[in-house]
Amino acid sequence: MKFSVAVKGADVSKDIGCCDTFLIFEEKRGRIIMRQIIENPGYKPDLLPGFLDRLKIEAILCGSMDELTMQVFTSKGINVVTGVSGNADRIADQYAITSKKQANMKSCLQPMPKVLVSCRGLNGENNVLAVGYCGNCSYDPPMVMVGIVPTRYSYQMVKESGCFVVNLVDKSYRETFDYLGSHSKRDGDKLTAMNVRLQDGKKVNAPILPDCPVNIECKVVDSIVTGSHEMFIGRIEYVHADAKFVDLEGNIDFSQIDFI
Ligand SMILES: Cc1cc2nc3c(=O)[nH]c(=O)nc-3n(C[C@H](O)[C@H](O)[C@H](O)COP(=O)(O)O)c2cc1C
């Protein structure tokens, strides 16, 4: 972010109209990475904001500013900070530290995983949905968790069967992933529509997706309703992985998988 401080001598100018120079700063992650001195081009309330706007600054700091100039700065999207005094460089350092903006909270943990969770209802019906709310949650015993919104068609299947499979997805399966994450089985047989191949799990009564490089069979040991999602905690019962990714100790070389 670029910002400017109106300066008289070495201090912040008491009034923007009588400053000698403008210090232009660029900050990145709270540190000043560029400092430039610009002579005051001559104070005119309607000209000064345009002059600084062309330098792409996002904030101007000074002691005080008349109402008209303030309005012109604000109309250009430049944040006006008045009531500032003291050494201009010290003020700039302090301002840079507080430059981060408040952002929205929803899904702010990124990058979000993209997996396909496969499941089977008590009547034998299979289903698959895309899941982003998931993660490792214990390595001893090995466990993962997946978050499913109760309105999903798959939700009841996992709830009743007490098991699911987490399938890691690579780029070759992108189209299928998008389809399974945007169509509900409630509205039609999406698995047939996308020719999704299924195989029975080894340890749990849910299908695995053999076209995905890694399939993690899980038994539900607990669940927590966190809000929008119910987080199902799954104890890992078996992990299938394409042979070319597995070394002699059984470790998967995840760096070879071209994840979506
Ligand atoms: C990238 C992506 C991530 C998603 N993450 C979740 C998730 O974590 N939990 C969830 O319940 N739905 C999630 N969805 C939405 C479901 O996959 C989608 O609603 C799906 O159609 C549900 O299928 P179903 O009704 O057949 O179970 C996600 C969709 C996409 C595209």
Image (cartoon, grey):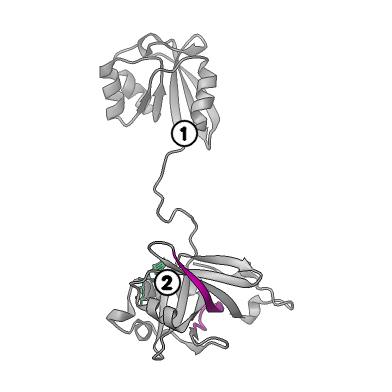
List the residue tagged with mark 1.
99
Vertical relation: 202 (above or below) 158 = below
List the residue tagged with mark 2.
130
Residue 107: x, y in percent?
42, 56
Vertical relation: 162 (above or below) 59 = below
Main secondary-structure element of the magenta-colored stretch:
strand
Residue bounds of the magenta highlight: 208-225
User: Magenta includes 219?
Assistant: yes
Q: Is mark 2 within 8 Å of ligand 1?
A: yes
Amino acid type of the residue tagged 1 in the rendering: Ser
State the residue in front, 105 or 23: 105
Amino acid type of the residue tagged 2 in the rendering: Ala
Asked if the residue under mark 1 is in contact with the one under mark 2, i.e. CB atoms within 8 Å, the reply is no
Residue 142: x, y in percent?
62, 72
Residue 172 shown left or right of residue 240 in the figure: left
Residue 11 shown left or right of residue 58 in the figure: right
Seen at 69% across and 73% down, the residue is 251
State the residue in front, 123 or 110: 123
- Nearer the N terminus, badge 2 or badge 1? 1
Q: Is residue 186 visible?
A: yes
SS at badge 2: strand
Residue 10: x, y in percent?
52, 11
Count neighbours of disc 2 (C-alpha within 10 A) and say few if under 14, some if 14 to 19, many if 20 or more.
Answer: many
